[in-house]
Amino acid sequence: MPDVTVKELSDFDAVFGGGMRRVRAGLGVTSFGLQVIELPAGFNGYPAHDHTHDDQEEVYVPLKGRVTLEVGGTSLELEPGMFARVGPAETRKLVSGDEPVRLLCVGGTPGAAYQPPEWTEEGSRPPEMGPHGEDKSPAAG
């Protein structure tokens, strides 16, 4: 049997009210972060955050719909076929427009081995996110 895992999006563990699918854990990937984020139309509640706590850079790839990536005082309109990389220290926020959005989010730590955050494991409790992407939940403290 080949070393391959195939799943449909609906098969992955969902957190944040279904807004994020734990694709990395569901596929058994350990070398980089991989999630799918789904935002309803007109959604402005995605938290502004950076990754100074874990030094991750992220790549956002719209799969469906258009999304605004707010970073560095700039608003960038992304649509399917576009890729956006955001460095660890940059505060970023995603805002959907008139249609729902589905994004692929890939994360990794430049020059270092990737260490998945515990909350990205299937079945684990999602965090209460702080402004730097850190887990602010009482149990994390």
Image (spheres, grey):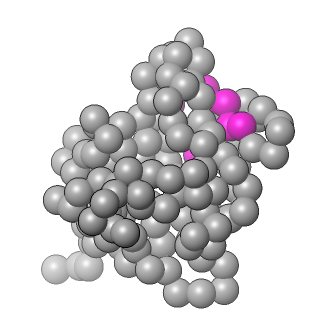
Residue 62 falls left or right of residue 13: right
Residue 94 falls left or right of residue 141: right
Please tell me whether residue 28 is drawn above or below residue 96 in the rendered image.
Answer: below
The extreme top residue here reads 98
Q: Where is residue 32 in the image (x, y as percent from the top left)?
A: 48, 72
Residue 2 falls left or right of residue 135: left
Figure quadrant of the C terminus: bottom left
State the residue in front, 52 or 85. 52
Question: Residue at the spot x=38%, y=78% of the render?
Answer: 30
Residue numbers of the magenta segment = 60-70
State the residue in front, 41 or 104. 41
Please tell me whether residue 6 is drawn above or below residue 42 in the rendered image.
Answer: below
Q: Position of residue 64 (x, y in %)?
A: 50, 30
Q: Position of residue 35 (x, y in %)?
A: 41, 54
The extreme right residue here reads 73
Residue 124 in sight here: yes
Q: How many numbered marks does the figure carry?
A: 0
The extreme bottom residue here reads 112
- Chief SS of the magenta region: strand
Figure quadrant of the N terminus: bottom left
Residue 99 falls left or right of residue 51: left
Q: Where is residue 46 in the image (x, y as percent from the top left)?
A: 51, 36
Question: Residue at the spot x=34%, y=68% of the render?
Answer: 140
Please tell me whether residue 59 is drawn above or below residue 68 in the rendered image.
Answer: below
Q: Does the magenta stretch include residue 19?
A: no
